[in-house]
Structure formats: structure tokens, C-alpha cells
Image (cartoon, rainbow, N blue to C red):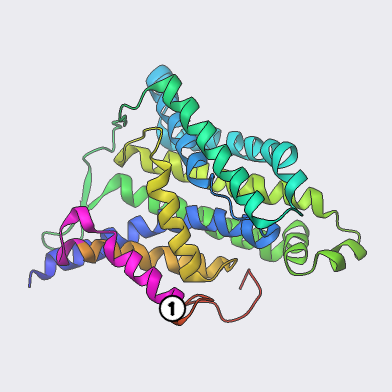
Amino acid sequence: MNWDLLVAMLINGVLVGGIYALVAVGLTLIFGVMKIINFAHGTFMMLGMYITYWLFALFNADPYLSLLVCGPFLFVFGVFLQKVLIAPILDAPEQSQILLTVGISIIIENLALFLWSPDFRTVKTSLSGVVFPVGGAIMVSAPQLLAFMVALAATGILYLFLKKTDTGKAMRACSEEREGALLMGINPHRIYLLAFGIGSACVGVAGALVLPFFYVSPFVGYTFVLTAFIVVVLGGMGNFVGALLGGLTIGIAESLAILIIRPSMRQLIPFGIFILVLFFKPEGLFSRRKKWVT
């Protein structure tokens, strides 16, 4: 066995898993607080990637600075959608919520297809092609390493926000007991706006981070949202820490799958893990209690 190759694939899996974790954290935040599954989550990431691309193409803006635009823009966009479209159906049957978010995704994707064509696009920065040696022949891509570090930092900041701040505690209170939060003077509707906005901002930041080493097209969101759902289920629906650990697990599983089977079938193992988890531990591998932030 080529041990250098194995270690390199493990490192690559961890780096990619950090991005998966950030995407899944936004998804699990929305579900944990609002109890709604956002099927448009991957489409929001696509928007973040396109914003990054056009800032680079038109103004030569560095993608890693573009996240300062993508995050706030997707936050405002998420708040707008939550207030105008999602809030009215929060108490509706689950199928109505699912159909609404799927419809939002389809509309945004087709609008992107109309405006920007189905062509694949990417950006090249000063870090593109730069690698760092990690002992022997093992090399680590600089864009992937930077994306992992920023994603991990963003996830950590969000975790501290939820655990330490009064607003974060209010969000956790709404997620666990809405009526009790109302009795304590917390306005759930404002908390829902904030939760949906933050969850959307997370995926916008993830979109800016991946563009230097990934392509963008109107339908790229499917690639990430399917993996994000696997990560959320693996970590436990609504479990923040589980989403982080699940993202790293799926990233490593995909990388190891490349060594075992053809690269084009690398998602076979993650989906296999997903099915096994649903069969034997549907509450999630890393879910130990009902609290969504553990």
C-alpha cells in the first residue's frame, strides 16, 4: 500500500469535510430552531459562488475577501425569504414546507440558468496551484487549506455565539421549547428570522471558499446539499457538534472511496453510510441527547 497516498487522501478528506461541515451547520441551525428542512440550501450556496465569481470577473476581487460580501448578502436574502415566504407556512404541514423550499430552489436555479447559462466557471487566484509539503511527497493544496481554516473558524465563532451570547441562548430556547421561550419574553419570529439568515450566510461563506478549487454552474447546489443532508442525518438532526463531526467523517469517507473504487463513484460510500445509519441509528451517530447544540 502506498502510505503517502493514503495519508494525502486522509488530509484531503479532512479539508473537504470542513467545508461540508460549514454547509451542514447552516442547514442544521435552520432545522434546529425552526424545524423546517430547507431544500433550497444548496441553491443559496450556488448564489454565493456566483457572487464571488462575478466580483472576481468584474472587479478582480479576491474570493477570500468576497466572503465579506457573500455572507451579509445571503444573510439579508435569507431573512427576506423567511419573512415573506417561509413564515406564513411555518405551522403548515411538512409537505407544504418541503414543496415551498423546493420551489424556491427551482426558481433560483432557472433564473441563474437564464442569466448566466449552464457553463461551468471558476476563478484562478495567486494561491491557485500553490501547495505545501507535509512530510515526504505529501502535498496540501493552499486554497483547500485556507478554506478549511476559515470554515473551521466560522463554525467555531457560530458555536460560541450560540453558547455564550444572550441571543444565542434565546435561539436555543426557541428550538427546545417555543411556548416557554414566549413566556420568558423571547419573540420566536425574530429568532426565526435570525436563524434563517445565519444559516443562509454560512452557506454563502462556504460558496466563496470553495470557488477557487471548484466550479460553479446553476445546478452545482445539488452536489453540496445532498452531502449536507447526509452529514446532518449522520450527526443527528439539529445537532450542531454532530454536523461538524459528520462533515469531517463524510469528507474522509469520500476520499478513501477514491482509493477503493473509481473516483466517479466516490459518493457511493457516503450514501452507503447514510443508509446504514438510517437503518441502525436513525437519530444519528453523534446524537446523544435531544438538545440541538451539544
Residue farthest toward the left in the current orientation of the protein: 1
Q: Nearer the viewer, residue 71 or 45?
A: 45
268 relative to 196 in the view: left or right:
left
| Secondary structure beneath label 1 | helix
Q: Nearer the viewer, residue 11 or 232?
A: 232
**What is the chief secondary structure element of the magenta stretch?**
helix
Is residue 197 found inside the magenta-colored segment of the image? no
Residue in the picture at 56% in, 53% down:
26
The x and y percentages for residue 260 are 16, 67
Q: Quadrant of the N terminus?
A: bottom left
Which amino acid type is marked by label 1? Answer: Phe
The x and y percentages for residue 145 are 33, 52
Q: Which residues are magenta?
A: 258-279
Residue in the picture at 66% in, 74% down:
291
The x and y percentages for residue 116 are 40, 22
The residue wearing badge 1 is 279
Mark 1 residue crowding within 10 angstroms, few (<14) / some (14–19) / many (20+): few
Q: Nearer the viewer, residue 237 or 65?
A: 237
